[in-house]
Each structure stands twice: as C-alpha cells, then as structure tokens.
Image (cartoon, rainbow, N blue to C red):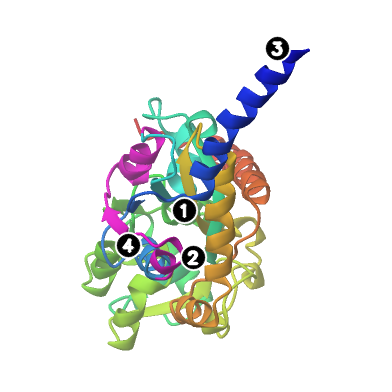
Amino acid sequence: MLRRTLLALAATLVSVPLAQAQSAWPTKPVRIVVPAPAGSSLDIIARLLGDKLKDRWGQAVVVENKPGAGGMLGTDVAAKAAPDGHTIALSFNGPIAFAPYLYAKVPYDAAKDLVPVVMTTSQPNVLAVGAHVPVKTLAEFIAWAKAKNGAMNYSSLGNGSSAHLTMELFLAEIGAKAQHIPFNGSPPAALAVAQGEADACFMVAPALMAHVRNNKARLLAVSSTQHPDSLKDLPTLASAGLKNVESLAWNGLFVAAGTPEAVVAKINADVNATLADPAVKSALDAQGLTPVGGSAAAFRQVVASDSARWGAVIRQLGLKLD
C-alpha cells in the first residue's frame, strides 16, 4: 500500500514540472518559417501575426523566409525541427496537400511528420492578365486563350501551387492550352504579368494589387464564391459555368509531430485571438485575405479533404513534376 502511494506521489511530482513547462511555453524566441519570399501573402500574414504574438508570448517572434521547391524547403524545416513548438511553419496547400501527388520524392510525410495547428487564412485565387493582353472580361479572356492555340503563357508562384493547379484545371475546363512559367513566390510571378513576360496568372490578390493600381495588370475573375469584401466586384468563375474550378488557397501553422498537445492548444488559442483582433482582420481584408481560425481538429479535416479532392484532380490532369 505504502509502495503504491509513494509511486503515485512520484508520478505526480514528475508531472507537475512537465505541466508547468508546457504552460510556460514559449521559453525562447519563436521562429515562423515562411516557405515563400518577402512580400508574398504568406510573408504578410506571418509578420502581422508575429507582431501581435510577441506581446502575448513575451518572446521575440522571428519570421524566416525560406522559399523554394514549391514551398517544400521551408515546410521541411518545421517537419525536422525539435518537437517543442518553437519552430512553426506557415505553410499552404501546395507543399501539404498537393506535393504527395505531384512528386515521387517529398522530404517529409505531411501526414506523419507535421501537426496542423490552426488555419490562418483562406482566400480565392484571382485571374489576372497583363495590360498587354487585349481583353477586359472573363468571357473575352476565354475566347482569346482558345484562339491563341497554345501560344499563351502564364506565371505561377511555383510548381504544384494552388495558382498552378487552378490554372491547369481552368485550361482543361475551357479546352485551351498554355505554357507554364513557374517562379519562386507570388511577387516575381505577378511582376512577370505586369511586365509582359507572362500573359496571365491565377494567384491570391496581394502581390497583384500594386500592378493593378499602376494599370499594368487587370483582375478578371475570382476563383471562389467565398471571397473578401475587397474582391466583391469581381465575377466568379462559377458565374461563367466553371464550377469545377472552384478553388481556395489556404494557409496555416504547422509544428513537428510529437509537439506536446498543450503547446499546440496554446498556439491555436493565441492565434485565434489574434485573428479576431479588428485591426488584424482589417489589415488582412485589405490584402484580399480572409482570416479563418478554428480548432486544430477542424484544420486537420480541411487538410485531409483538400488532399483527397486535389489528388483526384492531379491524377485527372496527369500532372507529375519529377
């Protein structure tokens, strides 16, 4: 009896410092790895969140840009980090939900090596054309793309991104072909359209807006019926009968598998509170980004369903990138 009591007491004493350690998280600066370049929508989101979270956490929040390999390089950093929550990836559907179907070799197993923590934003892709393209409406663009007979080209923020797959699905639906020019992130992909190097693109709005204001690019349509007020004047692809091209580009936080549940729960709660901040919501909406939040379980479901849907699309289109 005494032995059982002592063992129970010992277990309690061991659990107390563990619980205290988890509740005290973070114990050092937190790194948010962004698998996209400075100026991208991911970068904007990470810096907005980091500026608020540093006050909640009482620690510096360092944003580290690590673009490349369609987002896999930066995402891999979190997958291989110590499972303590101090390294977080702000990743997106490309390297998480699409990559396993597009590449024979991915440096991590998204389903096993990463834990979804919280969805940060979900936003549609917008269809944009350069000012040199002689169209002003979605219908005109569809007719023009078909008439180009494969001579059209388009930029994307990288192979296997939502921007890439949305355009490929769009082209398949309208019966047109085009040449793909992948870039490392949305800013150079948007610049290519504005400078006439590329004719068109699908991507989230932030990187395009300066070029639209300077009359170097035009927005023609939005890829989802769910979109922020800042894009409310754009027609949807569904309105042109292209319901199968409905797409949303989501972003979210991921940590290494094995991170304590208490740490995951704290990050989730604090990010949800930050996304509910009116100033943050307003800043995101101005960029064409819609804050989401929600539970870690809900985010896991989105990742799983998006992976299943786009895996089928990738197989249908016959896309392979290595």
Q: Secondary structure at mark 2?
A: loop
Q: CA distance from mark 4 to mark 2?
A: 11 Å
Image quarter where the N terminus lies is top right
User: What is the crowding at mark 3: few (fewer than 14 residues within 10 Å), some, or many (at least 20)?
Assistant: few
Task: Specify few, some or many for label 1: CA neighbours under 10 Å numbering under 14, 14-19, or 20 or more.
Answer: many
Task: Judge from the rendering whether residue 241 lies leftward or rightward of residue 60; answer left or right.
Answer: right
Labelled pair 2, 1 in contact (Cβ < 8 Å): yes
Q: For the C terminus, give its image quadrant.
A: top left
Residue type, mark 3 in image: Arg
Amino acid carrying label 1: it is Ser
User: 126 or 21: nearer the eye?
Assistant: 21
Q: Is residue 103 above or below residue 255?
A: above
* Spot occupied by residue 252 in the image (x, y as percentages of width and height): 50, 54
Which residue is the extreme one toward the front?
Answer: 2
Instruction: Look at the image and give the residue range highlighted in magenta.
Output: 52-80
- For the residues labelled 3 and 2, the Cα–Cα distance comes to 64 Å
Q: CA distance from mark 1 to mark 4?
A: 11 Å
Q: Amino acid at mark 2?
A: Asn
Query: Can residue 90 be seen?
Result: yes
Snapshot quadrant of residue 133: bottom left
The residue beneath circle 4 is 186
143 inside magenta stretch: no
> Secondary structure beneath disc 3?
helix
Q: Position of residue 66 (x, y in %)?
A: 26, 49
Marker disc for residue 162: 1
Q: Say whether marks 3 and 2 touch (CB < 8 Å).
A: no
According to the picture, the residue beneath numbered tag 2 turns out to be 125
Residue occupied by mark 3: 3
Q: Counting residues from the N terminus, which is met first, the one under dot 2 or under dot 1?
A: 2
